[in-house]
Amino acid sequence: MLQAYLKLNKNVLIAFTASIIISAIIAQVLSDQADYLNTTYTTIVDYVIYFSVFSSLFYFDNRKKYRLESGKTDTGKLKHDLKKLITSLGIAEIVYTVSRWALQYYFLTIDYDPYLASIVSQGVSTIIYMIVLNLSVKITRLYKDGN
């Protein structure tokens, strides 16, 4: 169970690292845009990068977990776990999106450099996200019941 939590957190942090770097570059490239547009576009890029990296890492870490001896996929177990994972991620994502957008917009309005506004807002929001995600995973019992 502890190993599963560590894998999940490792995947989230690697995905956020990739996302933070690329989002900062995009924020700087779009520095001539209005603050709300820069924030919105940067948040969209953040999500595309984060979910692409996270999904890939999660798949590679868990692909054997859902294999039956026959070689087929245990779709029942996979669906059960995906519902719990999506619930946990969904709750954390709502909190993350609101805090990230608001913080980046605020930092841009007080004249932070766009790349710095992106990095700081994403860093703070990631910490909040990790707390909410881990609490949600515990509440949904993602890694209980033999998972």
Image (cartoon, rainbow, N blue to C red):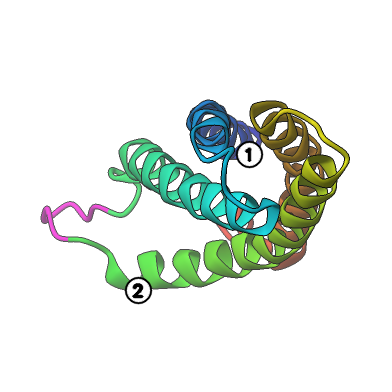
Q: State the residue in front, 69 or 102.
A: 102
Query: How far is disc 2 from disc 1 in space, using C-alphas?
Result: 21 Å
Q: Are marks 2 and 1 in contact (CB under 8 Å)?
A: no
| Res 90 → quadrant | bottom right
Label 1 sits on what residue type?
A: Tyr
- Residue at 77%, 31% (x, y): give it: 120
Counting from the top left corner in percent of width and height, residue 71 is at: 12, 53
Mark before the other along the chain sequence, 2 or 1? 1
Residue 117 x/y as whole percent: 74, 34
Looking at this view, is 52 or 141 the one in front? 52
Mark 1 lies on residue: 5
Foreground: disc 2 or disc 1 = 1
The amino acid type, in three-letter code, at marker 2 is: Gly
Residue 75 lies, with reference to residue 118, above or below; the image says below
For the record, the magenta segment spans 67-72
Image-based side of 78 in relation to 91, left or right = left
Badge 1 element: helix
The residue beneath circle 2 is 76
